[in-house]
Image (cartoon, rainbow, N blue to C red):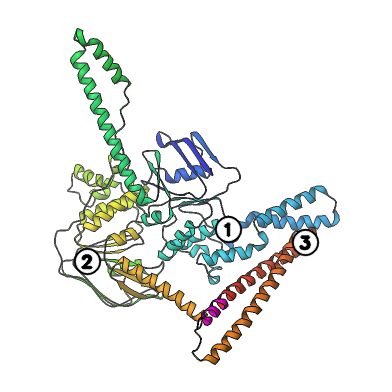
């Protein structure tokens, strides 16, 4: 087992966070950790990384295993460029290289010094283990794979978007190639393309993956186990999130059934004792039943630390049919045009999702439509009787308490009325007196939804409403939005919400907008575009022969010669590779730092050229086989 947890417990003061956590993680496990915000998910990850020590219990990592941790708000050095940040992952290797240079200079005059020779061998081993002399090649290959072309390598970290920062943090982890990838909310702020890349990468990862996520689609695509943290305990379920749901429901039903049976049995025993204890003829039997009752363990009633939020958005007055009319709309920010000539009409009761890659201008467009920003040109007209509400992606901090945030706006409400409202959004007991400035992102979002409920809008603008919500609250919000009879415009990357709303998608990309009938229609169109691109590339790489027999014979002869020449070149490069690999193991090369670096660079270039020739050879052979069928 790569990681083993046995009865691990942790408390912060009087608050028990984790209790008797027993679990194990093995190679090829893809484990999704779910739970309510504050259930201890990130705390558990920090224990695994050695950042926190448990109060009791045992925790072990297999000897020699390495762990890589992508934190929810991972730290990057804002003063560095993208390439420099990646290069920092090799800090131990670059330090070893610098020390190696100094030792090699000392060996010139002290060639027999045993300590220097031993240190030299140790440093070489460190560099070789990390393939340090190919550091530049490794960095560039991974950056390209993660969507950072060469033009972005000099970009400063401080100007990166949230999605870019997540991808850069993950790219650094790939350089380390850990046995266990531990990821805390890796899908936050990622667009469709990056989400799909991450899902495919994790499915093919050679090590184990442990991921905290509230994204149902992501958990279904990636995981084969679900760990649920609930009421300080951890329960493991086999399968992805969709497989977890019926297992969870069945487990709760069985526990409730056993609890009811135990309570009924205890009541029956107690009734017998009460009726027969004082009667001489049945006293012994009653005492026996009482002892049985005292020893009886009653199964606990199923408990869930999370509360299903049951609320519904309503409005008082229905607006006219034409709720929102957009004509020839241009949107720009910072001199960059994001939207050109958008014409659209949204009718009463309709829903519209605005989607697209990061930086395309989705949130800006929503703010323009809501009247919070001015367009570059064009007109936006709200229909008569429209009463809108707006939900910001990043909620502003309040200076008052939770209860006063509502009470200040609605002073005629009684304390009981305000408390009842807040309880519907899981603010109960002393939670209502929390300072709003100290609330988490998810708590601020719930507080804003409580306000929107009181505003009773017939048009809602929502910007990434599920971003900070746990998986249970996301489902509650999704149900409320599905039942909403008003008009809804929202920006979201939440694929489950997008699909469940069954509404049109306005896709924004490179100042263009495309309206799709549904989420499924959008995904089918994008899949078809990818397939068309692949087909076009293949067609371009393999031109069809002309029908003329003479030209056909000429091309066949040309292909035979090209295949033969390519095979000869591949064999020649193969011999060069074998020769260079042999040289790498010699003492002469290992002691010459500059020669070793150059040889590693040459070897990498040769392997790359051979790979290119193999690709060319496969294309030539495939075209030749096609012509032979003519």
Q: Earlier in the sequence, mark 2 or mark 1?
A: 1
The question of residue 627 being in magenta is answered with yes
Nearest the viewer among 527 and 80 is 527
> Relative to 225, does residue 162 appear above or below in the rendering?
below
Where residue 384 appears, x then y in whole percent?
Answer: 16, 69
The residue shown at (51%, 92%) is: 548
Give how far apart the Cα atoms at labels 3 and 1 are.
Answer: 26 Å
Give how far apart the Cα atoms at labels 2 and 1 are.
Answer: 47 Å
- At label 3, counting other C-alpha atoms closer than 10 Å, the crowd grade (few under 14, some 14-19, many 20 or more) is some
Q: Secondary structure at mark 3?
A: helix
Where residue 352 appears, x then y in whole percent?
Answer: 27, 66
The residue shown at (55%, 68%) is: 153
What is the residue that sits farthest to the top in this orientation? 280
Where residue 237 appears, x then y in whole percent?
Answer: 39, 44
Q: Is residue 537 left or right of residue 272?
A: right
Q: Determine which of the numbered discs, if any, sits on residue 589 in the image.
A: 3
Q: Main secondary structure of the magenta part?
A: helix
Q: Quadrant of residue 83?
A: bottom right
Q: Which residue is mark 1?
A: 175
Q: Which residues are magenta?
A: 620-628
Q: Which residue is mark 2?
A: 350
């Amino acid at each position: 087992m790569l990681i083993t947890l046995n009865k691990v417990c942790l408390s912060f003061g009087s608050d028990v966070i984790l209790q008797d956590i027993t679990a194990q993680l093995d190679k090829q496990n893809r484990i999704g950790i779910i739970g309510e915000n504050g259930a201890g998910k990130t705390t558990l990850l920090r224990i695994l990384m050695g950042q926190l020590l448990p109060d009791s219990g045992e925790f072990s990592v297999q000897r020699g295993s390495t762990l890589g941790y992508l934190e929810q708000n991972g730290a990057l050095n804002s003063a560095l460029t993208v390439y420099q940040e990646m290069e920092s992952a090799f800090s131990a290797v670059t330090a070893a290289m610098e020390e190696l240079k100094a030792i090699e200079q000392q060996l010139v005059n002290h060639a027999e010094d045993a300590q220097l020779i031993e240190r030299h061998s140790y440093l070489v081993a460190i560099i070789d283990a990390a393939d340090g002399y190919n550091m530049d090649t490794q960095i560039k290959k991974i950056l390209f794979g993660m969507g950072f072309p060469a033009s972005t390598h000099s970009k400063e970290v401080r100007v990166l978007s949230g999605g870019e920062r997540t991808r850069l943090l993950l790219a650094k982890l790939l350089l380390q190639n850990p046995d266990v990838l531990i990821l805390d909310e890796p899908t936050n702020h990622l667009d469709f393309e990056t989400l799909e890349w991450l899902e495919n990468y994790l499915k093919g990862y050679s090590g184990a993956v442990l991921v905290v996520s509230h994204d149902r689609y992501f958990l279904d695509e990636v995981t084969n186990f679900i760990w649920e943290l609930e009421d300080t305990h951890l329960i493991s379920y086999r399968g992805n999130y969709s497989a977890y749901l019926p297992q969870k429901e069945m487990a709760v039903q069985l526990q409730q059934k056993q609890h009811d049976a135990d309570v009924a049995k205890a009541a029956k025993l107690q009734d017998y004792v009460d009726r027969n204890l004082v009667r001489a003829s049945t006293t012994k039997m009653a005492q026996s039943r009482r002892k049985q009752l005292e020893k009886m363990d009653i199964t606990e009633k199923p408990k869930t630390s999370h509360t299903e939020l049951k609320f519904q958005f309503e409005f008082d007055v229905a607006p006219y049919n034409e709720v929102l009319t957009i004509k020839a709309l241009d949107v720009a920010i910072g001199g960059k045009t994001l939207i050109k000539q958008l014409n659209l009409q949204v009718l009463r009761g309709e829903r519209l999702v605005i989607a697209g890659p990061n930086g395309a201008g989705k949130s800006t467009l929503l703010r323009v439509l809501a009247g919070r920003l001015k367009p570059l040109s064009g007109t936006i007209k709200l229909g008569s009787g429209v009463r809108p509400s707006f939900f910001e992606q990043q909620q502003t901090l309040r200076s008052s308490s939770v209860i006063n945030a509502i009470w200040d706006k609605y002073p005629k409400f009684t304390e009981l009325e305000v408390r009842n409202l807040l309880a519907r959004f899981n603010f109960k007991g002393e939670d209502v007196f929390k300072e709003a400035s100290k609330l988490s992102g998810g708590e601020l979002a719930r507080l804003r939804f409580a306000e929107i409920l009181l505003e009773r809008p017939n048009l809602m603008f929502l910007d990434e409403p599920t971003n900070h919500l746990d998986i249970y609250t996301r489902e509650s919000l999704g149900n409320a939005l599905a039942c909403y009879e008003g008009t809804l415009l929202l920006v979201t990357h939440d694929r489950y919400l997008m699909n469940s709303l069954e509404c049109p998608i306005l896709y924004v990309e490179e100042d263009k907008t495309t309206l799709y009938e549904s989420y499924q229609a959008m995904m089918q169109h994008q899949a078809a575009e990818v397939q068309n691109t692949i087909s076009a590339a293949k067609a371009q790489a393999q031109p069809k022969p002309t029908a003329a027999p003479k030209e056909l014979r000429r091309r066949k002869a040309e292909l035979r010669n090209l295949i033969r020449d390519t095979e000869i070149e591949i064999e020649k490069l193969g011999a060069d590779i074998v020769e260079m690999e042999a040289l790498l193991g010699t003492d002469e090369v290992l002691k010459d730092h500059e020669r070793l670096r150059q040889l590693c660079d040459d070897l990498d270039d040769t392997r790359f050229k051979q790979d290119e020739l193999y690709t060319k050879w496969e294309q030539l052979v495939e075209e030749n086989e096609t012509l032979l069928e003519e």
